[in-house]
Image (tube, rainbow, N blue to C red):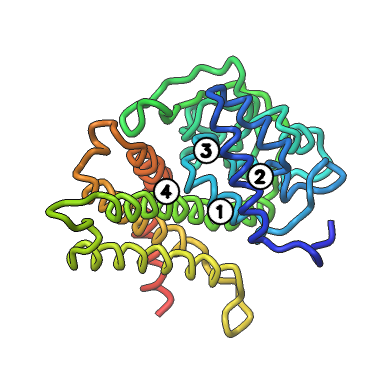
């Protein structure tokens, strides 16, 4: 599809409408079906597979909207896997929403168990010695891990005797990981923006002693700091998409690590400014915090790896 008349920002508006519509349903499969009908699942998939064939820049605002609206299905992973398997029946099924897929960031195919952040999927992309493999997890033993999110728990899935549907070579797997870092960073940043918007509205409408809470200097300073961190994350994501001054590809891991850290700060402060109501289930902001914390757990040790890489490069 030609991008001459298309702008990534326009996809944010379309994504808002589709995701809002999808969130009226509780069945994850129905949600994915609605997203696919709107073209979101196949935004990067090849046109011959029923996708739009657009670049990562067009997927970023879609995933940002998913984070802001607290979408619980792994849309970013669905988009990436459909894009990474051009010319296959698996890519067609993912772009059409007929099947769902996510990525296991912990473990590999040679391990007996791997961890995924969403168990409501048909297929799972798992690292292996030659890159990555897409496996069918239907009927595979699973164990729920509800510590971080009892509503949408992480899942340990057995890879033993799992049927391999497709494979990615090392280069394709490396590219997918880079793209995933940026999309997941944008998801976390979107979650932070959603919490910040809710908080700003609450502070402006909550009146105490005849004045809205947003009139208090301490509140305004904290909101400004939250917005600054959110904008820093956004700038880092955009910067990581481009080569450096020497024409070299930039490392995408720092953008993801910073986005997760900044989003966690913004969402926690949002809950604090609401009076802690998120912990009593009176507000949906706690869902955003849990989603970001699951991302942090999925990429455990990422910040330390970034620091180690930086020290070694000096």
Q: Position of residue 16 (x, y in %)?
A: 59, 46
Q: Residues within 10 Å of mark 4 (few under 14, many from 20)?
A: some
Q: On the rendered structure, is 263 left or right of 240? A: left
Label 4 residue SS:
loop
Q: Determine whether label 2 and label 3 are within 8 Å by CB.
A: no
Q: Specify the farthest residue to the top.
A: 139
How far apart are the two marked residues, 1 and 4, measured between alpha carbons?
14 Å
Q: Depth-wise, is mark 1 or mark 3 nearer the camera?
A: 1
The front one of 204 and 31 is: 204
| Residue hosting label 4 | 299
User: What number is the disc on residue 183?
Assistant: 1
Nearest the camera: 82 or 305? 82
Q: Quick check: marks 1 and 4 in contact, CB under 8 Å? A: no
Q: For the residue labelled by badge 3, is the local secondary structure a helix, a strand or a loop?
A: strand
Determine the CA span between mark 1 and mark 2: 10 Å
Q: Residues within 10 Å of mark 2 (few under 14, many from 20)?
A: many
Residue 79 is tagged as: 2
Q: Determine crowd level at label 1: few under 14, some 14-19, many 20+ residues with C-alpha closer than 10 A.
A: many
Mark 3 = which residue?
104
Looking at the rendered image, the quarter that the C terminus falls into is bottom left
User: Dot 3: within a 10 Å radius of its alpha carbon, few (fewer than 14), some, or many (20 or more) residues?
Assistant: many
Q: CA distance from mark 2 to mark 3?
A: 15 Å
Cα–Cα span, label 1 and label 3: 15 Å
Residue 261: x, y in percent? Answer: 34, 57
Q: CA distance from mark 4 to mark 2?
A: 19 Å
Relative to 225, residue 281 above or below: above
- Secondary element at tag 2: helix
Name the front one of labels 4 and 2: 2
Residues under labels 3 and 4: Cα distance?
Answer: 11 Å
Left or right side of 92 for 21? left
Residue at the image position 71 percent from the left and 40 percent from the top: 38
């Amino acid at each position: 599809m030609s991008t001459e008349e298309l702008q990534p920002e326009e996809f944010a508006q379309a994504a808002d409408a589709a995701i809002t519509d999808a969130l009226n349903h509780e069945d994850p499969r129905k949600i994915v079906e609605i997203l696919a009908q709107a073209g979101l699942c196949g935004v990067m998939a090849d046109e011959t597979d029923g996708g739009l064939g657009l670049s990562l820049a067009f997927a970023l605002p879609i995933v940002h909207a998913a984070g802001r609206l607290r979408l619980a299905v792994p849309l970013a992973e669905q988009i990436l896997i459909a894009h990474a398997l051009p010319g296959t029946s698996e890519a067609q099924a993912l772009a059409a929403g007929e099947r769902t897929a996510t990525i296991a960031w912990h473990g590999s195919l040679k391990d007996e168990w791997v961890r995924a952040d969403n168990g409501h999927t048909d297929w799972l992309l798992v690292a292996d010695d030659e890159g990555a493999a897409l496996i069918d997890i239907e009927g595979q033993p699973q164990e729920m891990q509800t510590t971080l999110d009892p509503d949408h728990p992480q899942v340990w899935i057995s890879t033993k005797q799992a049927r391999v549907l497709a494979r990615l070579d090392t280069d394709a797997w490396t590219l997918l990981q880079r793209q995933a870092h940026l999309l997941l960073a944008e998801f976390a940043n979107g979650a932070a923006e959603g919490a910040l918007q809710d908080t700003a509205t609450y502070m402006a409408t909550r009146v105490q002693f005849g004045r809205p809470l947003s009139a208090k200097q301490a509140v305004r300073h904290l909101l400004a700091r939250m917005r600054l961190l959110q904008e820093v994350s956004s700038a880092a994501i955009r910067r990581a998409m481009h080569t450096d001054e020497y024409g070299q590809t930039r490392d995408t891991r720092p953008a993801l690590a910073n986005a997760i850290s900044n989003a966690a700060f913004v969402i926690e402060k949002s809950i604090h400014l609401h009076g802690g109501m998120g912990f009593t289930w009176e507000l949906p902001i706690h869902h955003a915090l849990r989603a970001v914390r699951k991302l942090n757990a999925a990429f455990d040790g990422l910040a330390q790896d970034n620091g180690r890489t930086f020290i070694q490069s000096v």
